[in-house]
């Protein structure tokens, strides 16, 4: 079966063919050039390399004239063997050749002696005893009769050819059958029934011919299908006009064996993937006036992309690839691929704790919980993840110098305060609205990291709240949860950093974030 690239080679194998014909016509046409040796022989070799990698079938290269004299032909054989190509077919024309179906009679044949020398040189060069040389005579194509065809075929077989390809452009198989009738059977015969497709192959098998080359039928299939669908698409400008008749994208992935790469990545890549997952609480609308008419604030654009995108990219840079988002207001506007979504449809009357509880099933393993309205530099996450502790919060020590006019709801008091040279491992004492501004040691950034066992603890706390304090669960903020953990004797570690983040509560925040350093 003809193949002209890696994909068609693979498809021919899947269809059950036993061998591939690396057709000069099809390869040149697929490269967009003529079948006149316009593609150099090394360019053909490159195509072959892909075909050889894509399929385990034996490949017979249509080697034209061998791209020169005996010397070129033997170098070709060496290079083909290096690429696992099973054999080459050389034809008795002159370089540069022309396709047999174009002005065949005007084409000059190689001198028999010269061509026999080429065959001998090729056979002497092969290292693999199974490498096959098919000698192709164009005697009929060039208008010579049976006598010339037989004379040439006999000389070629005597020079070491493993098979004879006898080509004909007649619409019936008369020439070919005639040849077979008189052939000595010194070596097997190969035929290319392109021009006599109505002849059943059984006509030839009855005469002892078993080698058929379907020389260009993949390429012609591709051309017809492409022409039809491209025309339809151009005329209709409607993707649905062809959607049902084309392979799904998943089929491309299957043919590319994407699965294998995924498995190998697990075996060979260092474990860059973090075990942790991330959950973003992004249900609220936000005080952004007309800007949030059709989207929640987490989908507002900052330097060309939504706030959430900045977060996902930051997570992924730390190897956190399992990401969940709690949506609420305008949930349909939050539609990134590859994320898990949880919908808090009661976002109007509920708070952060309720949103967290909406994603109850996601609360397992190590988890990073983030507000949906913050952007931060990588250093913030790195700092938080690197700190020791099973429950950690990111705390900003620069809050006093930030030019905020609003009263912060996320101030914290900790056992110590940030110092530029300390290890900055303080414990949370309390957080949120109950913190006195004068006492505060920092501002909670809106990032909470829980190690596996503490995630389970938090999930349990939420379950208890749902059962016993539904109002707290409904209205509570995350700082409430932090305080509850501290009250229960848990150590909540404050991982201090200085600046390099921005919360986005109002339009002015968006504007200042445009110029914020480090984000
Ligand atoms: C080819 O497929 O390139 C061939 C066969 O050589 S034919 O086009 O019939 O000459
Ligand atoms: Mg050819």
Image: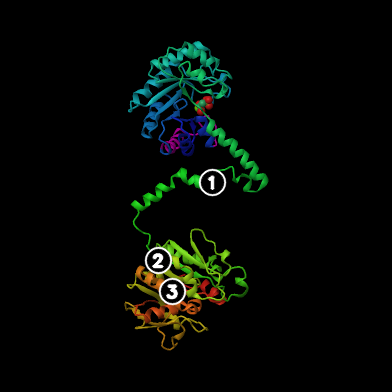
Mark before the other along the chain sequence, 2 or 1? 1
Which marked residue is nearer to the observer: mark 2 or mark 1? Answer: 2
- Label 2 to label 1: alpha-carbon separation: 35 Å
Circle 2 crowding by C-alpha within 10 Å: few under 14, some 14–19, many from 20 = some
Label 3: element kind:
helix
**What residue sits right under mark 1 in the picture?**
248
Quadrant of residue 496 within the rendered picture = bottom left
Circle 1 crowding by C-alpha within 10 Å: few under 14, some 14–19, many from 20 = few
Q: Residue at x 49, y 45 (%)?
A: 252
Residue at the extreme front: 467
**What residue sits right under mark 3 in the picture?**
462
Q: Is residue 263 above or below residue 307?
A: above
Q: Report x, y in % for residue 22.
A: 47, 31
Q: Is residue 155 above or below residue 256?
A: above
**Residue 156 in view:** yes
Q: Report x, y in % for residue 417.
A: 36, 83
Mark 3 near mark 1, Cβ–Cβ under 8 Å?
no
Residue at the extreme right: 235
Q: Magenta residues?
A: 32-52
């Amino acid at each position: 079966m003809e193949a002209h690239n890696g994909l068609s080679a693979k498809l021919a194998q899947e269809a059950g063919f036993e061998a591939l014909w690396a057709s000069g016509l099809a390869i040149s046409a697929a490269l967009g050039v003529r079948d006149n040796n316009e593609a150099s022989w090394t360019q053909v070799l490159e195509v072959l390399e892909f075909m050889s990698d894509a399929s385990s079938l034996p490949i017979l290269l249509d080697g034209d004239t061998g791209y020169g004299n005996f010397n070129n032909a033997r170098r070709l054989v060496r290079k083909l063997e290096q690429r696992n190509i099973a054999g080459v077919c050389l034809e008795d024309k002159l370089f540069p050749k022309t396709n047999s179906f174009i002005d065949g009679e005007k084409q000059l044949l190689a001198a028999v002696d010269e061509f026999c020398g080429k065959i001998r040189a090729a056979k002497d060069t092969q290292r693999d005893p199974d490498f096959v040389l098919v000698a192709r005579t164009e005697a009929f194509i060039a208008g010579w009769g049976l006598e010339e065809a037989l004379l040439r075929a006999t000389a070629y077989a005597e020079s070491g050819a493993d098979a004879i390809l006898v080509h004909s452009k007649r619409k019936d198989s008369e020439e070919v059958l005639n040849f077979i009738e008189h052939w000595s059977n010194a070596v097997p015969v190969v035929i290319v029934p392109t021009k006599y497709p109505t002849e059943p192959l059984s006509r030839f098998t009855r005469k002892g011919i078993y080698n058929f080359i379907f020389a260009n039928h993949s390429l012609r299939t591709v051309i017809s299908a492409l022409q039809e669908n491209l025309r339809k698409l151009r005329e209709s400008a409607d993707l649905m006009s062809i959607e049902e008749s084309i392979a799904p994208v998943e089929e491309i992935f299957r043919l590319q064996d994407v699965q294998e790469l995924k498995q190998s990545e697990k075996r060979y890549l260092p474990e860059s993937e973090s075990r942790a997952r991330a959950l973003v609480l992004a249900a609220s609308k936000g005080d952004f006036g007309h800007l949030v008419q059709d989207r929640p604030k987490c989908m507002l654009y900052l330097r060309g992309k939504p706030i959430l995108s900045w977060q996902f990219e930051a997570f992924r840079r730390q190897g956190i690839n399992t990401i969940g988002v709690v949506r609420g207001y305008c949930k349909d506007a939050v539609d990134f691929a590859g994320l898990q979504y949880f919908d808090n449809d009661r976002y109007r009357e509920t708070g952060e704790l309720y949103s967290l509880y909406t994603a109850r099933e996601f609360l397992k393993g190590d988890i990073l919980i983030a507000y949906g309205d913050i952007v931060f530099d990588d250093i913030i996450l790195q700092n938080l993840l690197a700190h020791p502790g099973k429950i950690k919060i990111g705390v900003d020590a620069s809050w006093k110098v930030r030019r905020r006019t609003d009263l912060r709801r996320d101030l914290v008091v900790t056992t110590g305060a940030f110092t530029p040279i300390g290890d900055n491992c303080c414990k949370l004492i309390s957080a949120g609205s109950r913190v006195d501004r004068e006492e505060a040691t920092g501002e909670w950034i809106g990032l909470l990291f829980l190690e596996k066992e503490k995630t389970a603890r938090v999930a349990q706390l939420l379950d208890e709240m749902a059962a016993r304090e539904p109002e707290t669960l409904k209205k509570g903020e995350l700082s409430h949860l932090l305080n509850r953990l501290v009250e229960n004797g848990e150590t909540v570690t404050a991982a201090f950093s200085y600046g390099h983040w921005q919360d986005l509560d109002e339009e002015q925040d968006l504007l200042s974030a445009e110029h914020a350093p480090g984000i």
